[in-house]
Each structure stands twice: as structure tokens, then as C-alpha cells.
Image (cartoon, rainbow, N blue to C red):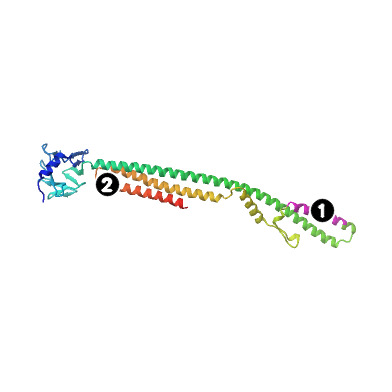
Amino acid sequence: MICSCTRMCCVRRELMQPKMKLVKHNDERVEYPLDAEVIHLGREQARTIPIRDPLVSRRHAEITCVSEAGGGDAWFIRDLGSTNGTYINDTLLTTSYRLRVGDRIRLGNTLFTYEEMESGQRFRNIIAILIALSTLVGALIAWRASVATDDAADARGNGTSVLIRLGRYQSGISASLYQNLGAFVSYRLHLGEMEMLDKALADAEDATHTSSLESERLRHANMALAALDLVDQDYLRRAESAAEQQFDRARFTETNLAEAATLEDLDYESHFRESDRAALIAQRLTITAVLISLSIFFYTGATLSESRRKYLLAVMGVVLFGLGTLAAALVELAERAA
């Protein structure tokens, strides 16, 4: 049941600033404080809120203050028999209606919203704080992503340097291996010549020919010994006969590389793994920074919006900010755990 304002309502309204307002959104934003017990809306200039709209009746609608049992005030709107009617949130008003914050009131082509007196400024202040917070957090995340990017580049550079160093060692080991193999092959060739000369000596009957064969065999024996001195005999596979001996190339390469690794860092793969890990962290942090940037975009939209959509935009901004911050925290925690 709607009643007229009581004396308590009037006294309180004289002592206090108006708490509610109507905001016009047509050509430009205009605010009308609800600072009287009854607010008249219509085309007449004598109305509390005159409206220049041919579709608005001279006496179109009125908004009335009503005191509630709890001590607060409520504002009710009713249509005064206007030609084109009064619409609340796109619904035709047929009875008195208690206004709620955010309600849209349309009279003809003129649109109002019912808001708290300082709600717009408070809302903008809150959004300004959220923008500042998002900017700060976004800057921290971007800085951390840049650090991770630099770490990835440094690790990859170190890995490349180690790989080049390993290549030099491998080249040196390969050269030494081929020297050993060349000497070993020469040694085996001279052994083969000695075997052939031994057979020839066994069949020789002429003393002169025998002496020549023995001299030739001695020469090959000396050359075989000389070639064997050039071979790293730690890698020879011993056999019952010298002709069956082999040079262990794989063990030679592995042993020399292992010795080199004790002197210098040759594990390039660990550096590349570290580079990939840091690059992945940088990528994930960049994504979170984008989420934070999108939250600022929605905050800005909420500041510029004059409709109830601003609350949705603000909520979307808060959600994106929360997701970005949580994702960044999880990335950092995962890195520390690793």
C-alpha cells in the first residue's frame, strides 16, 4: 500500500542531502537529484523535471517518496494517464512501482535510469582502483616474463657455446682417432708383409734369395714396430695373434669425451632444456599479462558505459584479472617446485 510522505520523511529530507537521482541518457547525460517529496515529470516547464519530447504528455508521471517501517525511504513511480505510457525496464507501467537501483524509465523517446546519488562516482572510483591494481600486477607479470625471456636467451646462448666447444673437442678426438687408425692400419699392413715373407723364406732354397727376404722382413718388422708406437695401445683389443688385433674406436671416442667433460662443461642439452623451460614460463606469463590487459579493457568499458551493462563489464574485468593473477601465481609456484 502506498501512502504519502510522513513528517519524519520531510524532516529527514530537509536535513540530509538527496540520496537518489534520475539520469537522462538521450543527447547528453543529465542528472536530476530527487530532492523533493514528489517529482513531477512531463512536457510542461512547470514540471520538476521538464522533458522536451513530443511523445511525452504535459503531465506524464510522478515519483513519490514514501517512508518505510525500517526508517528508510522508498521512491514509487506512477503514470498520470499519459498518452504513450510509462515503461519500466521495457515493461508498460500499469500500477505504482517501487523503483530499484538501475531501473530504466522510458517516457516517449526519453530514457532515464534510477541511481544512487553518488553511485556513479563511487563506481568510477572503484574501477579506477581496479585499473591501477591491474596495471601494477600486469607490469610485474610483464617484467617477470621479460626476465624469463632473458633467461631463456642466456641459456640458449650458453648451450650454443657448449655445443661449439663440444664440436671442437669432437673434431680433435676424431683427428686423433684417425691418426691412431692410420698407424694401426700401417702396422697391420707391415704384419701382413711379414707373414708373406715368412712363407717365402720357408720355400726359399737359394742362400742369396734367403738373405734378401730376411732383410726385407726385418725392414717390415721395424716399420711395424714404428707404426705400433704411434698407436694408443690402451685401446687395442688383444688377440692370440698380432694379425687379429683390433683398435676399439668407440671406446677411444667415449673415453676421450668423458675426460674432456671432466675439464669443461660439455652438456649442451641441459642448457637447451633450461632455455626451453624458461621460454615456456615466459610464454605462459605473457598469456597471463594479456588476460590482465583485457581486464583493463573491460574496466575502461565499464567506466564509459552509462547502462547497467557497466556492471557486467566490471565483473568480466574482475574475472579476467583473477584468472590472470591466479595463472601467474601457479606458473611461479610450478617453477619453484621444479
State left or right for residue 301 relative to residue 116: right
Tell me if label 1 and label 2 are in contact, CB under 8 Å.
no
Q: Is residue 337 above or below residue 149?
A: below
Q: Position of residue 337 (x, y in %)?
A: 46, 53
The quadrant holding residue 127 is: top left
Q: Badge 2: few (under 14), some or many (20 or more) residues near its Cα, within 10 Å?
A: some
The quadrant holding residue 62 is: top left
State left or right for residue 292 relative to residue 62: right
Identify the residue at image location x=64%, y=51%.
259
- Whichever of labels 1 and 2 marks the residue nearer the N terminus, that label is 1
Disc 1 to disc 2, how far (Cα)? 102 Å
Going by the numbered disc 2, the residue's amino acid type is: Tyr
State left or right for residue 204 relative to residue 142: right
Task: Check if residue 250 falls in the magenta segment.
Answer: no
Residue assigned mark 2: 311
Q: Nearer the viewer, mark 1 or mark 2?
A: 2
Q: Position of residue 57 (x, y in %)?
A: 11, 42
Q: Position of residue 15 (x, y in %)?
A: 15, 39
Tell me, for residue 219, which label it has, or none.
1
The quadrant holding residue 203 is: bottom right
Q: Is residue 118 above or below residue 94?
A: above
The residue stretch that appears in magenta: 211-230
Tell me, for residue 284, which label it has, or none.
none
Regarding mark 2 in the picture, which secondary structure is present there?
Answer: helix
Q: Is residue 264 above or below residue 207?
A: above
